[in-house]
Amino acid sequence: MFTTGNDILERRSQAVAESVAARFVPTSYSQVDRMGGTVVRLVLPPYLVEFDLDWMDNVVEVFVQPLQPDRPVSNRARRRLVAMLPAYDRALFESETRRAVGRGGLRGMAAQIDAAARAFEQFSDDTPARREVGF
């Protein structure tokens, strides 16, 4: 039996999605593969956190939106995590992300996910920062 390129991509995508879910321990998560990337959605009440993994550029973008049981999930409500951080934390996160992108490959993406996890933990623990962005 031999493996195809698609098999390798599916396994890589699944492994990264499981890694993201293990790092955050969400209520639930889903993975959507698309051309050139994967979107991992984590339900972390009171938020929905989306990791947009771009396999072509080895870049991870993180979006956060409040979960509202009475309203459907809308892309208009989602905001980039980096935009919601206080200035110092934002600069630190962007610096870590640039360094991680420079590494490239899965190691670089893993470093970006770790940086995002730390930033999200600070965001979710810091009530004034959440209030400032309207969450």
Image (cartoon, rainbow, N blue to C red):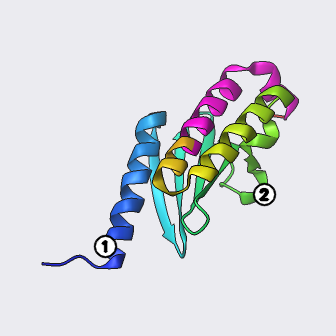
Comparing labels 1 and 2, the label whose residue is closer to the camera: 1
Determine which of the numbered discs, if any, sits on residue 76 in the image. 2
> Looking at the picture, does residue 99 appear above or below residue 6?
above
- Under circle 2, the secondary element is helix
Residue 9 appears left or right of 61? left
Q: Which of disc 2 and disc 1 is earlier in sequence?
A: 1
Q: Residue at x 66, y 32 (%)?
A: 119
Q: Quadrant of the N terminus?
A: bottom left
Percent x, y of residue 127: 76, 20
Where 16 sits versus 85, above or below? below
Tell me the element at label 1: helix
> Looking at the figure, which quarter contains the C terminus?
top right
Quarter assignment of residue 90: top right
Evaluate whether residue 70 shows in this view: no
Q: How far separated are the C-alphas under marks 1 and 2?
A: 34 Å
Q: Where is residue 45 shown, x and y percent of the image?
A: 57, 34
The residue tagged 1 is: 7
Q: Nearer the viewer, residue 120 or 108?
A: 108
The stretch of residues the image draws in magenta is: 112-133
Quarter where residue 104 is shown: bottom right
Query: Please, what is the three-letter code of the amino acid marked with disc 1?
Result: Asp
Instruction: Specify the amino acid type for callout 2.
Output: Arg
**In front of the other: 49 or 12:** 12
Where is residue 37? Give x, y as percent: 54, 67
Q: Is residue 75 magenta?
A: no
The crowding category of the residue bearing disc 1, from other C-alpha atoms within 10 Å (few below 14, some 14 to 19, many at least 20), is: few
Q: Is residue 98 in view from this perspective? A: yes
Which residue is more in the foreground, 117 or 69? 117
Quick check: is 125 in the magenta stretch?
yes
Q: Residue at x 70, y 28 (%)?
A: 123
Question: Do the residues under discs 1 and 2 have CB atoms within 8 angstroms?
Answer: no
